[in-house]
Image (cartoon, helix red, strand yellow):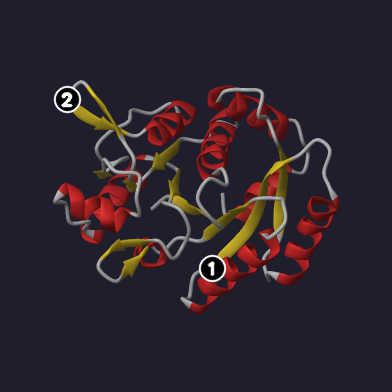
Amino acid sequence: MSKGLFVTGTDTGVGKTIVSATLALLLRMRGVNVGVMKPVTSGCREEDGGLVSDDARLLCLAAGVECSADVTPYLLREPLAPAEAARLDGVRIDFIRIKECYQRLAAAHDVVIVEGAGGLMVPLAGGLLVADLVRELDLPLLVVARPNLGTINHTMLTCFAARQMGIQVNGVVVNNYPENPGLAEQGASHQIGALCGAPVLGVWPNHDDCDQIEVVDHLANWLFKQPETTIVLREMGL
């Protein structure tokens, strides 16, 4: 079985897809056969009579793989919590189906990066949360955090909840760090590393002036050139 990593966020919109896609491209640049998965996507758009996940497409583009049904088992229309979006679409999210898709991807790739929906406590089906899916897939966690005021609390809560549920947290990436950080941004990464019980494995710069594909390319090439990247990937479990 291949290695795997589940990428979650401290909130929606913190850049999970950018981080996941960057890791996929970085591994690909290093000669790794990498797979990707976006098990549940809400807020999908319609294209040619079907639903499409732009997040999953970016992941697949970075990894150089086909955006297959195994990569995106559940595509939902409304931009809501997946449990509610699935109810409106008349869909029941089945963890067994997701796990079977993951196992097929794991059999075909050396590493599989799985991107979650929102944060760990997002409901997927009934009383089951994203955290329950992480446990079902038996994967370690990478937490993506924002750099600004409030992130220490959100990141600590995410790491605490993960440990309470028996999930291994391999580290934290602070994403979208501004070029001219304020006092809150300057101190947040240190506090997160000191208090969360998980290492900060990266402080990634903001690239608001680029589209998503360009951001992923910039970040992957930046990381590829850093000598410590091999150690960082090892700490992530990759």
What number of labels is visible?
Answer: 2
Task: Give coordinates of residue 205: x percent, y percent.
Answer: 73, 37
Task: Give coordinates of residue 206: x percent, y percent.
Answer: 70, 35
Residue, disc 2: 49
Task: Give coordinates of residue 111: x percent, y percent.
Answer: 46, 45
In this rendered view, identify the residue nearer to me: 13 or 142. Answer: 13
Residue, disc 1: 168
Residue at 78% across, 38% down: 227
Which amino acid does the dot numbered 2 rest on? Gly
Q: Secondary structure at mark 1?
A: loop
Task: Give coordinates of residue 127: x percent, y percent.
Answer: 29, 71
Quarter of image, res 188: bottom right
> How far is the residue under mark 1 from the one under mark 2?
40 Å
Residue at 20% across, 20% down: 48
In this rendering, is residue 28 above or below 199? above
Q: Counting other residues with Cα less than 10 Å from the Cα at mark 1, is it few (<14), some (14-19), or many (20 or more)?
A: some
Q: Secondary structure at mark 2?
A: loop
Q: Nearer the viewer, mark 1 or mark 2?
A: 2
Q: Counting other residues with Cα less than 10 Å from the Cα at mark 2, is it few (<14), some (14-19), or many (20 or more)?
A: few
Pointers 1 and 2 in contact (CB under 8 A)? Answer: no
In this rendered view, identify the residue nearer to me: 127 or 164. Answer: 127
Which amino acid does the dot numbered 1 rest on? Gln
